[in-house]
Image: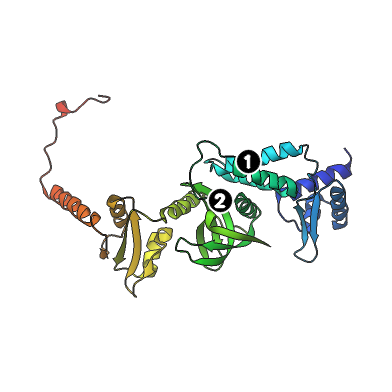
């Protein structure tokens, strides 16, 4: 294989691994001049790859869909079958490696011509895999765009509709996509809020790539998992209540961290914090995290209020009562019995 062919294949591999490449960076990666990069791009275009170029300091190259499938050693039917399979896998919200499935799907659909993409869309709507978890429908196109932006560290803009119906425009640095509880979530740094935010992907629309790259802020897998866990808890619960605690808002947020999302300042010395759960026991569990010594009131409604009161009264009586006599050593069961 000639050096020219080898270099062209290396260039193609780079174009497929990132959405947008500056010409100078491609030249540096390949160890050639930018003029040589331009010639190699033309060779790939002659082979059927549609490569968009843009001038200027922020310009560069990106691989786009063409009018025919470029030479991937796949027939049209094989390409469609692969895209359908990846869509089904993504729709089942795989627990392991969900972003791998989505980025593979996005990379394949990126080079499919329009007629084949229409076939994929039609077949995907007709295919209903057995055992599919119910949940809000998510556009695979939106998932793919977000996955590519997360992988390439590219800022995006989108429209978001909150559970309340409020529609806002958001500018974010996407960090990770994760499936949880029948939904997909996007964890990102909100540029306007200057804080981490987690969005339900099914409520996202009009994803717009800015071509502005960013350096991702460090997050551990444990921190990502916690963010998603918090996002999962922000759905309407069977039992909901507010706790108004004698604690300034800033101190409350410092103590609770991301778990303080949704809290609001009641006044200079009090903070209102929404808490809830599947039943009054989960609500009580949330209230138990209010720091020791901090007085608070709650509007927990009936019958949960009465059930919680009765349980607490029994606990207090149990604590005040003399402890039961300890069992003699001989009466204790042997290990494994």
Q: Is residue 57 left or right of residue 188?
A: right
Marks 2 and 1, Cα distance to the nearest angstrom? Answer: 14 Å
Horizontal placement of 81 versus 167: left or right? right
| Foreground pick, 30 / 303 | 303
Instruction: Quadrant for the C terminus, please.
Output: top left
Judging by the rendered image, the residue that carries numbered circle 2 is 138
> Relative to 43, does residue 208 appear above or below in the rendering?
below
Read off the residue under disc 1.
Answer: 86
Determine crowd level at label 2: few under 14, some 14-19, many 20+ residues with C-alpha closer than 10 A: some
SS for tag 2? loop
Q: Position of residue 288 (x, y in %)?
A: 29, 55
Residue at image point 19% right, 52% down: 312
| Residue 9 found in image quarter | top right
Q: Is residue 321 left or right of residue 291?
A: left
Q: Where residue 79 sits in the image (x, y, percent)?
A: 72, 39
Residue 186 placement (x, y as % from top left): 54, 54
Q: Is residue 190 above or below residue 282?
A: below
Q: In the image as oriented, which residue stretches furthest toward the bottom?
A: 268
């Amino acid at each position: 294989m000639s050096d020219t062919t080898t270099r062209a294949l290396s260039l193609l591999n780079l174009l497929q691994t990132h959405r947008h490449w500056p010409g100078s960076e491609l030249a540096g990666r390949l160890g050639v001049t930018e003029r040589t990069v331009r010639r190699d791009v033309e060779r790939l275009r002659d082979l059927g790859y549609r490569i968009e170029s843009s001038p200027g300091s922020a310009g560069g190259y990106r691989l786009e869909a063409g009018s025919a499938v470029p030479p991937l050693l796949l027939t049209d039917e094989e390409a469609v079958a692969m895209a359908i399979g990846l869509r089904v896998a993504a729709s089942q919200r795989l627990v392991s490696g969900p972003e791998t499935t989505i980025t593979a799907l996005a990379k394949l659909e990126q080079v499919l011509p329009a007629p084949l993409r229409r076939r994929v869309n039609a077949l995907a709507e007709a295919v209903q895999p057995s055992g599919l978890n119910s949940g809000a429908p998510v556009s695979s196109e939106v998932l793919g765009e977000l996955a590519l932006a997360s992988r390439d560290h590219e800022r995006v803009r989108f429209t978001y509709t909150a559970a309340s119906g409020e529609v806002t425009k958001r500018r974010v640095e996407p960090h990770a996509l994760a499936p949880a509880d029948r939904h997909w979530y996007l964890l990102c740094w909100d540029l306007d809020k200057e804080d981490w935010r987690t969005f339900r992907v099914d409520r996202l629309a009009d994803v717009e790539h800015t071509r502005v790259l960013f350096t991702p802020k460090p997050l551990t897998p444990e921190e990502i998992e916690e963010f998603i866990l918090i996002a999962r808890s922000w759905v309407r619960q069977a039992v909901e209540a507010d706790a108004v605690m004698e604690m300034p808002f800033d101190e409350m947020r410092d103590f609770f961290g991301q778990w303080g999302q949704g809290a609001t300042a009641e006044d200079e010395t009090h903070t209102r914090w929404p808490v809830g759960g599947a039943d009054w026991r989960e609500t009580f569990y949330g209230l138990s995290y209010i720091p020791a010594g901090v007085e608070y009131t709650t509007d927990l409604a009936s019958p949960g209020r009465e059930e919680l009161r009765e349980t607490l009264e029994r606990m207090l009586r149990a604590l005040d009562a003399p402890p039961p006599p300890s069992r003699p050593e001989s009466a204790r069961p042997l290990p494994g019995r």
